[in-house]
Amino acid sequence: MASSIRLGVNIDHVATVRNARGGLLPDPVRAAKLAIAAGADGITAHLREDRRHIRDDDIARLKAEIDRPLNFEMAATEEMLGIALKTKPHACCLVPEKRSERTTEGGLDAAGQQAALKPVIHALKHAGIRVSLFIAAQPSQIEAAAALGADIVEIHTGAWCDALAEARAAQAEAEWKQIVSGAALAASLGLEVHAGHGLDYASAEEIASLPQIVELNIGHFLIGEAIFEGLSETVKIMRAAMARGRGSIKP
């Protein structure tokens, strides 16, 4: 188990603000550099089919200009595979994608889409790119990820975070138990375990207490809070929350 925990900052919604007005500002690459300077261990960016936030030139610039790992979130399509193989980011996180959704809803169905995912995963790994699957913390999905040869699973924490925010205590407890058992199962199968979606300071601190989880990927909350506090400050506060959670692990 890792004694430290990494923070990946998702800069998609800096691009959302830029695209709402058009033009070049605010620049998501500048946001990535500020996040790194404040303590981010890596940068996550999702190039969607409809290019609603991150654009192709953003991905190219991120790869060229940042000095930390780039985690390229993508649907398992021929177009995105071609871009990934050309860009060669540190890692690719395969996610589900629907045109009608506001953001990624639910985890990837690795168990039900093995035939479609297998060649994409093989091609990425053959190119030396680490492969992550963004999945629910369900045994069938985690076992499928291992069978497919993924390097990493990123546990979708959205349902847990929503239950916490809406004070649905029973559901939050049930979701938390699934995350705890899922993280343990994934680690036992040799998968590196990440987590993300909907995390804020409090939930990030709590999930950082799980020793199997070595990375959190957080975007919307940090970018939203940055409106009031500044991005550098929000990254620093998040890092402190994660450190408190990690520090609560008993030897």
Image: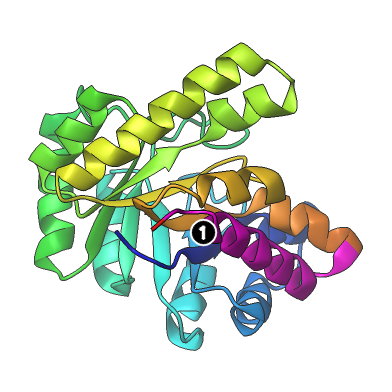
Relative to the observer, which residue lies in front, 194 or 66?
194
Relative to the observer, which residue lies in front, 54 or 219?
219
> Which residue is pictured at 19% across the width and 39% down the height?
145
Q: Residue furthest top?
A: 170
Neighbor class of circle 1 (other Cα within 10 Å; few <14, some 14-19, many 20+) is many
Q: Is residue 176 visible?
A: yes
Tell me where residue 54 appears, x and y as whole percent: 57, 59
Task: Give left or right: position of 195 versus 150.
Answer: right
Task: Give left or right: position of 223 versus 203.
Answer: right
> Which residue is pictured at 33% across the width and 50% down the height?
193
Q: In the rendered structure, which segment of residues is drawn in magenta?
A: 229-250
Name the quadrant containing residue 141.
Answer: top left
Is residue 247 magenta-colored? yes
Callout 1 secondary element: helix
> Which residue is pictured at 25% across the width and 48% down the height?
78
Which residue is the site of mark 1?
246
Tell me where residue 127 appears, x and y as whole percent: 14, 69
At label 1, the amino acid type is: Arg
Image mark count:
1
Is residue 234 magenta-colored? yes
- Image quadrant holding the C terminus, namely bottom left
- Above or below, 208 against 144 in this view is below
- Above or below, 66 against 220 in this view is below
- Above or below, 203 against 127 in this view is above
Q: Residue furthest right?
A: 228
Q: Residue furthest front?
A: 251
Tell me where residue 128 appears, x and y as whole percent: 16, 71
